[in-house]
Image (spheres, rainbow, N blue to C red):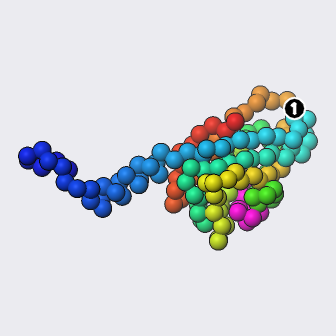
């Protein structure tokens, strides 16, 4: 802070903490891709996600993917997660049909790394009729929150 004679005090611990919080607040997902296995009506559609957060997501942190609306997949608190990164999330997530949301909790002893992509999948049942494409969103909450952003 500036003193009466306009000199600046050396950095204090409070300022360092503030700088850390600003850096964490500006964190984003460096990679946030989604793909699907089929567009066929009523078919089981394997959704593949590739993510790389800008800050490590630690045990207990939650990653929410939303906007996957229009499926026939019923609410499920333990929807199976597969793929190379499945163990990071304990091989399951919480699915909510009306919002098309999957909440993945980082399992005990695990983390989502920042140095490499994490790939995981889960299955949904496509709608009975064709629908307009949706743009899923991703965000995280917990020790190192990342604001919601569109996936590609």
> Is 51 situated above or below 112?
above
Indicate yes or no whether the magenta region holds residue 88: yes
Q: Position of residue 113 (x, y in %)?
A: 63, 58
- Count of residue discs: 1
Q: Residue drawn at (53%, 59%), measured in percent from left and top?
A: 142
**Residue toward you, 53 or 47:** 53
Q: In this rendering, is residue 141 above or below 28?
A: below
Say if the magenta span includes residue 148: no
Q: Nearer the viewer, residue 100 or 85?
A: 85
Residue under label 1: 129
Q: Magenta residues?
A: 87-95
Q: Residue at x 76, y 60 (%)?
A: 86
105 versus 140 height, above or below:
below
Q: Which one is nearer the viewer's eye here, 152 or 60?
A: 152
Residue found at the far left of this picture = 5
Left or right of 97? Residue 45 is: right
Q: For the point 75% across and 64% down, which residue is it?
A: 87
State left or right for residue 64 relative to residue 68. Answer: left
Q: Secondary structure at mark 1?
A: loop
Mark 1, other Cα within 10 Å: few <14 / some 14–19 / many ≥20: few
Taking the spot 80% from the left edge, 52% from the top edge, the residue there is: 122
Q: Position of residue 57 (x, y in %)?
A: 59, 58
Q: Residue 43: x and y, percent?
A: 91, 42
């Amino acid at each position: 802070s500036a003193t009466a004679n306009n000199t600046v005090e050396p950095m204090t611990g409070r300022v360092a903490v503030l700088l850390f919080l600003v850096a964490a607040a500006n964190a984003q997902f460096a990679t946030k891709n989604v793909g699907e296995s089929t567009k066929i009506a009523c078919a089981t559609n394997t959704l593949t996600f590739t993510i790389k957060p800008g800050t490590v997501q630690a045990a207990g942190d939650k990653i929410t993917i939303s906007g996957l609306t229009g499926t026939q997949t019923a609410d499920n608190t333990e929807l199976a997660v597969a793929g190379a990164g499945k163990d990071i999330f304990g091989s399951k997530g919480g699915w909510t049909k009306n919002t098309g949301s999957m909440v993945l909790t980082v399992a005990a002893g695990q983390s989502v790394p920042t140095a490499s992509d994490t790939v995981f999948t889960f299955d949904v049942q496509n709608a009975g009729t064709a629908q307009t494409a949706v743009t899923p969103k991703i965000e995280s909450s917990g020790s190192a929150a990342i604001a919601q952003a569109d996936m590609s």
